[in-house]
Amino acid sequence: MSEKQLLGDDEIKLPTGYRAAGLRAGIKKRDVKDMALIVSDEPARIAGVFTTNQVTAAPVKWCREGIKGGAARAIVINSGNANACTGEQGMRDTAQMAQWTADTLDVPVDTVFVCSTGSIGDLLPMPVIEKGIQQLVPALSQAGGRDAAEAIMTTDLYPKHWSVTIEVEGKPVTVSGIVKGAGMIEPNMATMLAFCLTDAKIAPDALQQALTDAVNQSFNRITVDGDQSTNDTVLLLANGQAQHSTELTPAHPDWSAFVEALHEVTLQLALKIVDDGEGSHKRITVLVEGANSDTDADKAARAIANSFLVKTSWAGAHAIWGRVMETMGYSGARILEDQVDIWYDDVQAVQSGIYTGVSRKDLETIIAQPVFILRVNLNIGDGTAVIYTCEITEEYVRINVE
């Protein structure tokens, strides 16, 4: 078993009032789980954030419409088939998945959300899907989170999850999440599905704002390869089963504690995606400071994090800082070459646009680490941005030509 797989060998804590299941329905040829179901025993409020790709899969369209109703009882998910670019039949199949799930659970169909991930362009094998739903419902349990996390994986090497418990009005409140994603990862968002659950009581508008803010500081801060998917979905359910009496809003004294917990869950899930990047073995934090604006800092940071020349130099542990310079030069951010400073961890490689003369061996030792920080100061203004990314290896190519 690989080191990456070992990272996922623990159980998943679900908040009060949720059950989950995951199993092999037979969508994938391999003997792995490929369908999951998450259920709230009571109606939950729901918020969502979706891909900004103009080409969107049928289940994304279904979920975007569904969150307008504001209520959720279930999320049914399949892996191995994206149900994207499948036209009207794809929409009918998504609706049918929701209807089968609603009928089996005896809940309204407009409270069932559907997500798919996998290859683009193929129709769903509906008889397999129907049988899978029939098997998932009796398998639901409070302990089923790990099975669900395994079932949503595609090229992931291990299931990804995180949980935080806080106190609201002195009562325990849990925020948990599972996510899948390893390639085609570029905000906004990636070929990723994320499902966050809480038993907190939260006002609807506050729930959506909390999720949007958390996603912007987590899933929209990562990139593996600069590609954006058709199926990206983050859903947050809040079923109100915790024992605190007052709904959480920004005016509540414990609001900040909930927001911090949600931010922790989404950030940790996002970092797990980077750590499991296809073929990667490193996590690099790209921090750009001193830009003309936050927007400029973001442009420079994303250009660095997505440059295959930069990423392959990281893979080889080569201190080719010139690639960082030239990448920022075309990023669209305002750059004054003779004011740029660059550090690898705490070792400065570039000062005022010129090599400091520091030992390249020292720099390469840093770049060879599994985790390091590339920090750039443009020395123009106060703009800052951070992006979490990884290197690109030969293994990435092999995974994506199979």
Image (tube, rainbow, N blue to C red):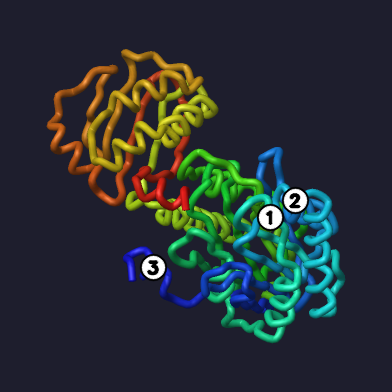
**Mark 3 touches mark 2? (CB < 8 Å):** no
Q: Residues within 10 Å of mark 1 (few under 14, many from 20)?
A: some
**Of residues 117 and 110, the one drawn nearer to the viewer in this rendering:** 117
> Which label sits on residue 5?
3
The residue carrying mark 2 is 86
**Residue at 78% in and 61% down:** 94
In the rendered image, which quarter is residue 10 located in?
Answer: bottom left
Q: Residues within 10 Å of mark 3 (few under 14, many from 20)?
A: few
- Whole-Å distance between the Cαs marked 3 and 1? 29 Å
Relative image position of residue 346 (x, y in whole percent): 24, 38
Relative image position of residue 132 (x, y in whole percent): 69, 76
> Please, what secondary structure does the residue beneath circle 2 have?
loop
Could one spot residue 251 in this view of the protein?
Answer: no
> Please, what secondary structure does the residue beneath circle 1 have?
loop
The residue carrying mark 1 is 122
**Mark 1 touches mark 2? (CB < 8 Å):** yes
> Which label sits on residue 37?
none
Q: Is residue 299 above or below residue 185?
A: above
Q: Residues within 10 Å of mark 2 (few under 14, many from 20)?
A: some
Relative image position of residue 364 (x, y in whole percent): 19, 39
Q: Nearer the viewer, mark 3 or mark 2?
A: 2
**Of residues 13 and 400, the one drawn nearer to the viewer in this rendering:** 400
